[in-house]
Structure formats: C-alpha cells, structure tokens
Image: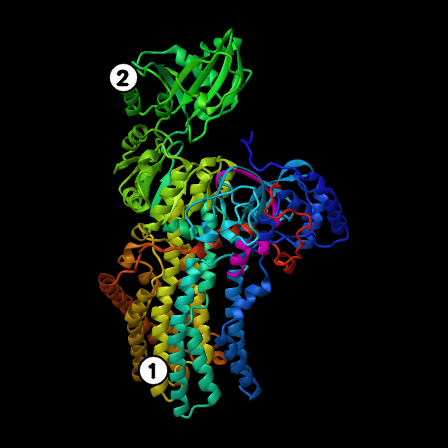
Amino acid sequence: MRAAVTGIGTGDASVSGNENVSDQQDRRGGAPAAMSIRAAASTGWSAVLAALGSRSDGLTSDVAAARLAAIGPNALRTHRVRIWTVLGRQLRSALLGLLLLTAVVSFVVGQRTDALIITTILAASVGLGFFNEYRAELASQALHSQMRHVVTVRRDGRVATIDVTDLVPGDVVDLDVGAIVPADLRLIEAAALECDESVLTGESVATAKDPAPVALAAALGDCTSCLFMGTVVHQGSAVGVVVATGGRTEFGKIALGLGEREPETEFQAGLRDFSALLAKVAGALTSAIFVVNLVLHRPLLDALLFSLAIAVGITPQLLPAVVSTSLAIGSRRLAERKVLVKRLVCIEDLGDIDVLFTDKTGTLTEGHISFTTAIDAHGAVCADAVALGLLCNQATVEHGVVVSGNPLDAALWEAPRAAGAADPLAGSQRLATLPFDHDRRLASVLVQRGDETLLVSKGAPEAVLAKCVSVPPQAQVTLDAAFREGSRVVAVASRVAPGATQLHPDDERNLELSGFLCFLDAPKASARGSLERLRELGVTVKIVTGDNGLVAEKVCRDLGLQLDGTLTGNDIDELDDDRLQEAVARTTVFARVSPEQKARIIVVHRRAGSDVAFLGDGVNDAVALHHADVGISVDGATDVAKDAADIVLLEKDLGVLADGVVEGRRIFANTIKYVLMGTSSNFGNMFSAAAASSFLKFLPMLPSQILLNNLLYDTSQMAIPTDHVDEEVLARPSHWDIAFIRQFMMFFGPISSLFDFATFGVMIGLFHAHAPLFRSGWFVESLATQTLVIFVIRTRRPFFRSRPSTGLIVCAASVVLVGAILPMSPLRHALGFASLPVAFFGVIAGMVVVYLGLVELAKQRFFERHQPDSGHRRRSRTHRVHRLASRWSHHGPLTPAALTAPTAPVPSDAPVVAGQR
C-alpha cells in the first residue's frame, strides 16, 4: 500500500473536454498534444493532464496506440542492422575508393587484366569484412531484442506493464525506489520522493520532489514538480504523467547528440586512435613511394596503384570485424556459462572490474535460512519469543505452507520448534501493522489477544533494544556471542497497548524485551574457491550487508576472505566523502547499511579510480546497481534490481561471475594480438616494399599481389577471437595503450624488414631472379612470416609453452599453404607469378625458423623494458549517458516524429504557480 501522499488535489472535471478533443484528434491520425517540461512544471497537474488529453487513471489502449503511431517509439537508440549500413562501413575507406578508381582508369587505358584482378581482390576483401561484421551485428541485434525494460502504467483504468519504448505523452506512470524515470514526467503524487539527477545536472546530492508547481522561469534543476528521463528514484514513490518522450526529453536531447547507434566500445574508441596513428604512417609511406617511383620514371598509374596498395596493406581493415566477432562470440560463451549480458559493451566493462561489492546472502552463503533457537537476554531458551515472533510476522501461510514473505519470517514458520507455538495465534486478531523499513529497521503489529491489546515489535537487535526499557546488562553479551557464532539475530519486544486500534512509528516505545530469534545461513561450499579465483584475477571482494558486522566477519573467516576492517552504517554517516573514500579502500565489510549508504560507498570508491561492480538482488540494491560501473543481478532477483543491472547471472554464484570477468579480458587480449601483428609484420613488409622499389629496376610486388597478400593474411586472422589466452594476461584488466603499440611497431617492424631484405638477397644473388620469380619468392616469404609470427606474438611466454587454439593453427597453416601453392598454380601467369625452384622452399623454411626465433628473443627483451599501461579507466559522464540511453533501444529507425512534436499551449485558465495541484 502506498505511503501517505502529498499533492493530491482536484481538477478532474476540467479534463474530460480536452480528452475528448484529443481522442478525436487521435482518431483522425493527428499527433497528440505535448507540452514543454518547464510549462508543465509551472502548471497544476490536473491542467497538465487536460492539456495532454489524459486523466489520473491514464489513457485507453486505443488512444495510446494512435499516439504511438503518430509520434513514434520512446527510443533514443536503434539496434536495427541494415545491410547497406554495414557495407557502407566497409567501403568508407578513402584508400579503397581511390585504389578502385585508379584500377578503373587502368582498365580504360588498356591494363585490363591487372585492373580486373585488383577489383576482384578488393571485392573479396570487402566481402570478407562485410560477412564477419554483418554476422556479428545480427548477433548483437538478437541480444538487444531479447532485452526488455518495462514500466508500470495505468491503461484502460487498470495497472499494466508495458515496454518502456511504448510510452506516449499522456500515459500515467507509477514509480518506486530504484526505478529509472522512463520519460519526462509531471508529478501527480509523491511520497517522500527524492531523485538522483546527476546524469543531467552533475550534482551528486539527490533532489527532493513534490507535485507543487514552480515558477515558469525556474531553471531545469529547480523544476521539482517534474521528473526527467534517465534520472533515478533515490527514495520514495511517485505517480506522474508523461509530458515528453524520446528525443523531446531533456536527457534524450543529450543522448541523441551522441548518436543513434549503440555506444562504441573501448575497443572501437581505441581503434580510432590507432587508425589515426596508422593513417600518418601510411600517408608518409605512400607519398614517399609515389615520389620515388615518379623519379625513377615508372608509369604514373603503376606508381599510383603500387603506392595505394602499400597504404591498404598497412591498414588492419578487418579490425572492426575482429572486435565485433570477438564480442559476439563472447556473449555466446557467457550465455553458456549462465551469464546474460544486456549490451555487448558490458562484456568489456566486466573484464575491467577490480573491485566487487556484493551482498552476503546467497552469494557467500547457501541462501537458505533456517531457524535454530530462541533465547532470552541471559541465553536461556525462550519459547515466548517464538510465539511473539509468529504474531509479528509478514509471511503468508496457506494450509500450513508458507507461500510468500521475507526469508526470516518464512524460516520461523517452517521451523519444527515453531509448530508448537502456533496455537496462540488461533485466538488472536491483527488490528494494525507497520511494515519493516530501512530507516526504522523493525516491523510492528497491533494484536488483540483475548481481552488484551498487544503491540509486538521485531527487527534488528540494536533498533529494538533502543525502544526497550530496563534492558538487562547481560543482553548485549548474549547478543554478541550469537553474532560471533555466525547467527542472524532478530530481537522481539512487546508491550500492552490498551484501547489502541492504529499504529504509528511513535508508538514503538517503552517496550519490554522478550528475547532473540537466532537463524543460520551456512557458508556456501563453493564460495571459498570462487573467492580465491576472483583474488587471482585481481578482483577485490567487499561485503555490503544489512546484517550485523560480526556475522559477516564470521562468514568471511570461514571462507578464507581476508578481513581488512568493518564499517557500519553509523560509521559511514560520520565520514565526509574524502574520509569515506580513504576508509572504503581499507575496509572489507560494510554492515547495517541503508540503500543510500550502499550507493554512496559505490560512488566514492569509483571516484578513487577503481572499476567497481556491485552485485545485488533486492529493491533496495537498485540505486547502487545504477551507480556501479557494472551492475550485476541474478535471475531470481526483484524486477527492479534486474532492470537496473547490466548483467544477469542465472546462478547466484561468484564462480559464474569470475567466468564473466575472464571472458571480458579474453576478448580484449585476443583483439590486441591482431593489432600487434598488424603493426609489426605488416608495417615491416610494407616498409620493405617501399625501400625495395627505390633500388630495384622493377616493382618488388605488383599492386594486385600486395592486395592478395593482404587478403590472405586477413583471412588467417579470423580465428583469433577463438584463441586461448595465458592465465597471467587474464590476471589483470588491460586497456588500449597507443604509446605501447607504437613502441611495439617500431621495435618489431625492422626485424621483419631485415628478413625481407635477406629474401631479396637470396632471390637476386642465389636464384638470379627476374621480376616474376622475385615477386613470387617475396610473396611466399612475406605471407609466411607475417602469418606465422602470430604464434610468437600471441603470448608473452616462450611460444612453445602457450597452446594456441586449433582454429588458429588450421587457419594460419592453410593460408601459408595457399600462398606457397599460388606461384605454381594455373593462376600464376594471371597473377604475375612464376614457378619457384624446390630449393627455394628449403631456404625460405630455414629463414622463417630463424625469423621466428629472433622475434622470440626480441620479444623477451621488449617486454622486459616495456609494459602496457593497465591503469584504471576514467569513465566520463558521456559513458554514463550512453549506458543509460541503451535502455531506450528500439529495433526500428528513430523517426523524425519521435524527435519533434507539436507543442500544446498551456490552457488559458490553467493556474500558473497557483495552489492547484
């Protein structure tokens, strides 16, 4: 039942005429009326309802459907995959376009065979990238289509649950604590309502809300009568009417300014920086090669085609496809491990975490609470405490079976010892109740038992004892002993309340302590191994619980979790943010904490630079889930907790979570393998081609051969997302480090070039090669070295101590074999190759072995001197906007009508900053 509500008023009689007008407008297919949020904030809520053609019990389904058709979905992102969009990304490269144009010119002037070969290879290259990226995009679309974010609305005079993207102006929405505001709303009702609006205002302090109108000129942050899309209900509950949806909302304007597609991952952001680096290198090489070839009086078109082919060869064209494929494979692997991600970017975020805040029940313990005993203040068995505990009990029992209720109440009913105490309930009548809340930390009932009216309170021992009179000194000693044994303890107290018929929190006073109810939730057998595994992954686990600190400490000791200190909710309240930030870093257990304190702990620890995950499953965890870098819930959690989470575990098991962390790090590690290969061997080979063209009398490789070499190389790397990753790489998060990649390129590139020049010497000095034979020999050598070097670069260990995946071995070996066969195939003349002597393969095999050995030695030396930066990411406000905006993701396009809509004037008789509510 909703708490006492402020802001209830009259004005419904003025609604009907406007609603009829709106209904007629909808039937004609016109767009429904809309208001600016500032106009709504300064107007009485009943007048806003009238202007929007709605009323306090909401819209009809027919009207809502007409409005949705006219305005469009309440969406900010589209996850629709379009073939032409994906293909366009493959063709976006200016280098490819220029190369294709040059090939067309070559065809026109008579070099038709070379032009056709180049065009065919380019088409195959684009097709390879398109196929892999489109397949990954379809997987992403399927993932997003499975995720639903719902909202409670009033439709047809009833409460209903609909998808958040189906909201329209005029819908009346119910919100409770932890909910994300689904659109811009004008408040109708509010009960102790506070909202976190930091995503809009940057202010970390929650804002109190009330339906009373504000001044028309009020700033956005002062519109306390409205709720804004993307903000979080920090406390209380509310009812509001939707004023604006989609891109017309204040949050929507910000989110759409960042684009309509899902946010780019850190991989893709790093790719932009990486591509900028390669563009500079490619630009310098291309220009130099082109000038040198012109100076050597080579044909203009040949020089241009060769230069552009070099530039294309140094560009890792398949990197976007490798990233997308890695994420898609990762989501499937996580699903197999019972980890469901709502967005692909969540996989990357999960791999970054270094601190996990989690509750205790069901995570470190079995999650099955059993009643053990009832004792009085002196530790003696106390049956009266059981009887009173059953009187003050919120469990629902049908035919002797508990069908609902909190775990402690249910455990008390189910206990064999409680069965004998059930008789006193037969002659009792419950007159009034005060449910448990996190401020009072207790629940009370008023019971008529015969001629006696009894008030019974039950809850956290410290809260109940504070309401009692004449508490025996031994009570605290008894209580602490129970806590140290790992028991969850509930205190029970009562007093006679003659003539009382209602209950108020002020009545919870002058109680007499009856005793303590002790419950046990045994540590989970698998938790010790899971905690050890997370520790090996560099993830620090901290416990956040509403239970007593001594109980949490006992569980931690039983499971071998290192204890670095305990803070209670009262301790937290005494610390400012700076002191709390320092304290959190050296604390393991946070006990007796409220939902607001959980969120505050998360926020201050993130501010210290940590990547923070929070695992929770209750309504009171929702706010903290929103504030964490990665919000994690479980399949059996409350709806609001699952809705707030980024990741849902099908089992509440830290081992399952560890699997997710590993998968996130595996994806990043495999992507970096492709990048490091492309910036070392590719760079070296292209530099060698540039240098050789300056002293040879012919081009060292034809443009078509360079492109074919690049296509085969890229094909060999498509199995990288399936590769194994060394345990030591998974032991810590990794991030893009462009400086490290640049150092790697400059260190290993010359080694590749050294063996290219050795190949040049062998071909000219040993085999007296003419142009086709020279090109054939270097084609085979360069493809073999740049493909096989993956087995050295993929690991920091000696390569023979790290096992690659079968798929990677097969792909790499197949490409090297194809490269060796091509110069002897029927296609050799068309491709400009010549058959290679058998002795050449023996020489090249030896050179490849020596090359890989030298790279192995150089790798050890390089990693002794250089390490990538694995520091924390500083996520900006933009990252949070992207994360929130993904909730309003739609499978279709965002229509112009969803971004703009006609604005209805405020009714002339509407009171502005008046007393009407």
Q: As shown in the figure, which amino acid type bears the numbered disc 1? A: Ala
> Going from the N terminus, do you reach mark 1 or mark 2 first?
2
**Dot 2 crowding, Cα within 10 Å, few <14, some 14–19, many 20+:** few
Quarter holding residue 187: top right
**Whether residue 779 is situated above or below residue 616 in the rendered picture:** below
Q: Residue furthest top?
A: 451
**Residue placed most toward the observer, 347 or 762:** 347
Colour approach in the figure: rainbow
Residue beneath label 2, please?
473
Residue on which disc 1 sits: 691
Q: CA distance from mark 1 to mark 2?
A: 90 Å
Amino acid under label 2? Pro
Q: Which residues are magenta?
A: 233-259
List x then y, in percent, for residue 241: 61, 44
Instruction: Residue at 28% x, 35% y: name it.
Output: 566
Q: In the picture, residue 879 is in which quadrant?
A: bottom left
Per the image, label 1 sits on a secondary structure element best described as helix
Identify the image quadrant of the N terminus: top right
The residue under the point 45% across, 46% down is 334
Give x and y (percent) for residue 473: 27, 17
How many marks overall?
A: 2
Judged left or right of residue 265, residue 69 is: right
